[in-house]
Image: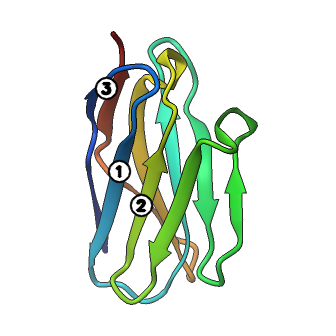
């Protein structure tokens, strides 16, 4: 069983930056992909960024050039550096992880609010 804990959310003005972190703990066999999703009020959850254990990275078009995902395989952590934040980035951000056996885990979410 893997437990994911996110941190780093908060309130920031448009154009500002935040860094989200997610730490995996528990009985970890082998985490393959680690991902960040977000869900805004009234909208479906969407993938923001993903990174595999080999370093392959994916970004949603809406965040390319502004967000950077990084990962520490030894520590089983993943971070999301968010720059040039916009009001439309406001959402609850969730950490997601897949183990090599196919199990999927979710964090509890952290609120990011971009507002002046």
Q: Earlier in the sequence, mark 2 or mark 1?
A: 1
x, y percentage for residue 28? 36, 84
Say whether residue 39 is left or right of residue 92.
right
N-terminal of the pair, mark 3 or mark 1, is 3
Q: Where, by quadrant of the figure, is residue 12 drawn? A: top left
Q: Secondary structure at mark 1?
A: strand
How far separated are the C-alphas under marks 3 and 1? Answer: 13 Å
- The image quadrant that residue 102 belongs to is bottom right
**Mark 2 — residue?**
79
Determine whether label 2 and label 3 are within 8 Å by CB.
Answer: no
Give the residue at mark 1.
20
Residue sitting at x 57%, y 82% = 100
Front residue of 15 and 88 = 15
Quadrant occupied by the N terminus: bottom left
Sequence-first disc among 2 and 3: 3
Give how far apart the Cα atoms at labels 2 and 3 are: 18 Å
Quadrant showing the C terminus: top left
The residue sitting at 48% across, 87% down in the picture is: 30
Q: Helix, strand or loop at disc 2?
A: strand
Of badges 3 and 1, nearer the viewer stands 3
How far, Cα to Cα, is label 2 from label 1? 5 Å
* Residue at the extreme right: 61
Label count reads: 3
What residue is pinned by disc 3? 12
Residue 101: x %, y % from top left: 56, 81
Please report contact status of discs 2 and 1: CB closer than 8 Å, yes or no.
yes
> Could you tell me residue 56's position as x and y percent?
71, 72
Q: Nearer the viewer, mark 2 or mark 3?
A: 3
Q: Is residue 14 above or below residue 60?
A: above
Give the structural element (helix, strand or loop) at label 3: strand
Name the residue: 42% across, 26% down: 91
Q: Position of residue 31 (x, y in %)?
A: 49, 79
């Amino acid at each position: 069983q893997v437990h994911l804990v996110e941190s780093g959310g908060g309130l920031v003005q448009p154009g500002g930056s935040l860094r989200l972190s997610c730490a995996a703990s528990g009985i970890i066999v082998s985490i393959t992909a680690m991902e960040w999703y977000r869900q805004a009020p009234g909208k479906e959850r969407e993938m923001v960024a993903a990174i595999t254990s080999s370093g392959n990275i994916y970004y949603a078009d809406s965040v390319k050039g502004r967000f950077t995902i990084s990962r520490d395989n030894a520590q089983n952590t993943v971070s999301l550096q968010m720059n040039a934040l916009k009001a439309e980035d406001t959402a609850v951000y969730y950490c997601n992880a897949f183990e090599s056996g196919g199990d999927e885990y979710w964090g509890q979410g952290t609120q990011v609010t971009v507002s002046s």
